[in-house]
Image (spheres, rainbow, N blue to C red):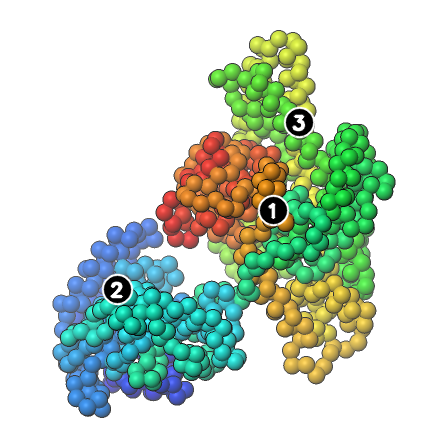
Amino acid sequence: MGYISELREVGRDDVAVAGGKGAGLGELVRAGMPVPRGFLLNTAAYELYVRENGLTRLIQAEAALPASATTQDYEEASGRIRGLFSGGGMPAVVAAELRDAYHQLAAGAGGEAAVAVRSSATAEDLASASFAGQQDTYLNVRGSDALTEAVINCWASLWTARAMAYRAREGIRPEDVRLAVVVQEMVEADAAGVLFTANPATGRRDQIVIGAAWGLGESVVSGAVSTDDIVVDGPTGSVVSRRTADKDTMTVYADRGTREVPVPPSRRRQSVLDDAAAATLAGYGTRIAQHLGSPQDIEWARRDGEFFILQSRPITALPEPAGETPTDWSVPYPKGLYFRASIVEQLPDPLSPLFADLIDGSVSRSLNALLDEAFGKSSLRDGDLGLPVINGYAYYYYRTSGLWRMMGKLPAAVRALIRGDAHMGIPGWRDYSHPRYVHVVESWSARPVAELTGQELLEGMSALLDAGTVYYTAVQSIIPVASSSELAFQKFYDAFVRREADPPAQTFLLGYESEPIRAETALFDLAGWSRGVPGLSDAILATPTKSLAAAQLSGTPPAGMDEGLWQQFEHRFQLHLDRFGHAVYNLDFINPVPADDPSPLLDTLKFYLRGQGNDPHRRRELAAARREDSTNRILARLHPARRAAFVRLLRWAQGSAPIREDALADVGLGWPLMRRMLRELGRRLVAAGLIAEPDDVFWLRRQEAGSAVEFGLADPSGPAAITGAQRPVLAEAVADRRMRWRGQRKAAAPQMLPEIRWLQRSMAGMMPEGSQDQQGNTIKGVGASQGRVSAPARVLAGPEDFARMQPGEVLVARITTPAWTPLFAMASAVVTDVGGPLSHSSIVAREYGIPAVLGTGVATRRIASGQQIEVDGDAGTVTLGQPGTA
């Protein structure tokens, strides 16, 4: 059997014998790329070496580390395995073939060849996992004896500690990996670097990013030297931007191997590649990516003006393409103020285009209705308020003149709030707003979505959104009532009642039920019931969460689960979704709710099935017992007059706080039906050839959706699909909007506009988040729940990240809503950008007895997942430790 192959003899289908790197290089040679001459020592040679030296069982025994293995365990096992390799002898047949192949390569080079010896594992340079840098490379190897030594060292590097740990994390068994070795003529490069055929920072597939440095490329790949960074527009080859680094060191040949030397002063700040050279190199990158069918991470070298491709691997962690992050926050209407508060707090991300078009008018109408009730008719004029977007972010807009008119009628508003006029205050919410909202949802629910015309789908969606915004506006009148009651009680208690040994005021407000707590308790009880059904708990835990969620939505059992067990569980879980599945994570209807993606709830259910977390029944009983005991002790010592005031304020606060949570929990009542309507519309637009996927409907403008309906394209009985286009008509517009949205999402939207410093400082206390200019290792916020915890952070953008949350981590989020409550059972503490001592986050954190620091303004940008942080709920601070691993 032959152990040597020429590179052109292998290709992308030969990973088993050539390894990932070898197969990739062979494919590049076949495609006509300028790859340095060389050959491949295939995986059969590795297997023969291991077998003839009796290493198979020894390696397997050393590599069989438990899941709990530490870094030191891997280091020790690696040292023992690599010692086994260094003590072995090269099989004669492999040694002979290797020597002959090297001499042929040297003859072609005109004498003794300097070669690069590169590891090529069967589990590397793959689309699913790159394993970059996990095995070793040896440069400037000269002579057959040195080559043999380098090959054995490459084989041994299959068992470095980092490679073993990486494979364990990726679920690749030790017995399933082998190693080939690529031997190539060294390119004595005057410049080298890396090239990405898609922008790794923004994900844009139309941009090529080049890193370039003087000398050999080894130090560029390792990150040891500074590089020039050049961004090239892929379609045109023109340079979009460049940054020329101060390149103080470079890698060059040594007598054996390589060494670093200073860059000559005249070249330190000189560009390595001019625009023409960058365009030529980018052209190679484009051809390689097109040939291999995916974005590539390429290593290159240049000698005497000629480029060589040393390696190409798929980019495995490329983000979705994102536009530029906006920096200009100019306002559309200058005579007014813009705030990110109230309903905008539950819109933390840039808005989807369709939602943005609809929400402005919807909120304006509901606010006008509420303010007319509060201030009297004609108190507001057209254009006095709105919900415009700036760089995609929603802002409450108040025209200055309208704001002054409203301030003048504040006393009338307070009287209306106290009376509960129309949909204001707790009586208005209970007797008017909530029943009205339920009626609208029930009316549209009675009509099968699939039978509605396109026009009816748009009308129903708009009616539900309007009902939701009217309801949310009404809830805004409950929040000040609840907040005032809690603040009034706290101030009275701290000033006239509390002694040194007495509990904090919040103790008297805990242990009550609210809708988020009821939802958590119901999920806990469902886990308890599941444990009582023989085989069900194990079946749920053994089934991937995504499979369970898909089965719940489709009504078909997940693969591998007994149908009878599934039907029992599916029925009970559906009852839970019917009651609690409308909780919103973000008011923008582009975001799924649990009713149409129950994955986050299923992850929490599994958490309880594993026996983790606390019993919410017991937790509430203990809180209620502490509350009653503390109340009785306080009442026993108070003078009658002070006792009467204490009781009156306490009952007011105890009655208001749970209602606020109940009201907020039902904001999304219409969202599941609204999303079903929109996705039905999306399916019809896909059939008509306008968009590619049903969810693309969220990225349309209101006028585009309306025009499609007007021409009958969104009705089952409407005209046939549009023909003559190779791709959906609006595909490019949708892709462009998605890309722009991702760039906008990276921005830090100012809380108030225009950005007038003195005005921002004077109103800082009224804003729901702290300063975005905080520096240093201590982040300040509002201490909303007492206690101190030091633990790793978990930064979550939304429900798509919930599965990453691990028990005991600190939950770090932009904001939390009632839909986030299940995560509080896992969290050791909570930190948010937005929120205050009377927000949902603080109330739930206190119920769970975990520290909370809210309204930091910067937590999600300053903290990294895995980073150790200390959360001090008493001081309202978060102290940053060393970054960890996500």
Looking at numbered disc 2 in the image, what kind of residue is underneath it?
Trp
Nearer the viewer's eye, disc 2 or disc 1? Answer: 1
Asked where in the image residue 835 lies, by quadrant, the reply is top right
Mark identifier at residue 756: 1
Indicate the position of residue 92 as horizontal and vertical percent values.
Answer: 14, 81
Mark 1 secondary-structure assignment: loop
Asked if the residue under mark 1 is in contact with the one under mark 2, i.e. CB atoms within 8 Å, the reply is no
First in sequence, mark 3 or 2: give its number: 2
Q: Please identify the quarter of the rendering in which residue 107 is found.
A: bottom left
- On residue 159, the disc is 2
N-terminal label among 1 and 3: 3
Q: Earlier in the sequence, mark 2 or mark 1?
A: 2
Give the residue drawn at x 64%, y 24%.
Answer: 488
Q: Quadrant of residue 262?
A: bottom left
Residue at 70% in and 67% down? 683
Q: Would residue 622 be found to the left or right of residue 170 on screen?
A: right
